[in-house]
Amino acid sequence: MLQQDSNGDTEDVSLFDAEEETTNRPRKSKIRHPVASFFHLFFRVSAVVVYLLCEFLSSSFIACMVTIILLLSCDFWAVKNVTGRLMVGLRWWNHIDEDGKSHWVFESRKESSQEKKTMSEAESRIFWLGLITCPVLWVIFAFSALFSFRIKWLAVVIMGVVLQGANLYGYIRCQVGSRKNLTSMATSYLGKQFLRQNTGGDQTF
């Protein structure tokens, strides 16, 4: 497993205290963790549905607001701590060191050839589809509430944007690496291209 901290340093560590046993199931369309896949979508989709239908479900704004916030909170915890680990082998978290400094850690499991065969592409699609689609919907709801002057709902939709956007940002960092690594890779690539062009130009003469 490859661990990346907020400073861009990487090292091989164990992703979890007890690694799950791999099976010989094919990678194609098998869903290895149906319960995790279900709850990955259940809380976030339920929050969206309650928001859209709240005026028909209940006349109490407080009841709808509390229900939506509870669903969003359950979704944040489940996606951050359970479904990302099981479905795609990613995890992000924060810890405080002995000096009181906060460190954000973005982890991704280093897959062996055997693990790649047993991971589910269907689960990966479900994970990323739910992770990306729902924050986009909450952003649309935020603009809709703002432009329609539904100010009382603005706090609710902002909560949805923040909680689901945080998970999206964290898992993107796990997947593609830290900004420092991306910057160094881009700089190295551009440098190689520049040297290659100069070398090629010299050889033409």
Image (cartoon, helix red, strand yellow):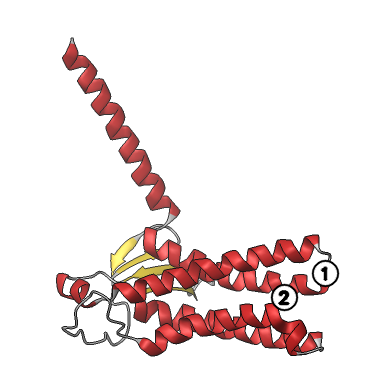
Q: Quadrant of residue 76?
A: bottom right
Q: Which mark is residue 156?
A: 2
Q: Of label 2 and label 1, which has the lower sequence position?
A: 1
Q: Is residue 21 left or right of 123 when viewed as pictured? A: left
* Spot occupied by residue 113 in the image (x, y as percentages of width and height): 15, 70
Three-letter code, disc 2: Val
189 in relation to 7, above or below: above
Q: In the image, 78: left or right of 57? A: left
Q: Tag 1's secondary structure?
A: helix
Left or right of residue 200: residue 146: right
Asked if one can make out residue 91 in the rendered structure from this viewpoint, the answer is: no
- Classify residue 151 by image quadrant: bottom right
Name the residue that disc number 1 marks: 151
Residue 141 falls in image quadrant:
bottom right
x, y percent for residue 200: 21, 21
Could you tell me which quadrant the C terminus lies in? top left
Residue 46 rendering spot, x and y as whole percentages: 59, 83
Residue 48: give its label: none
**Within 10 Å of the Cα at label 1, are there few (<14), some (14-19), or many (20+) other Cα atoms?**
few
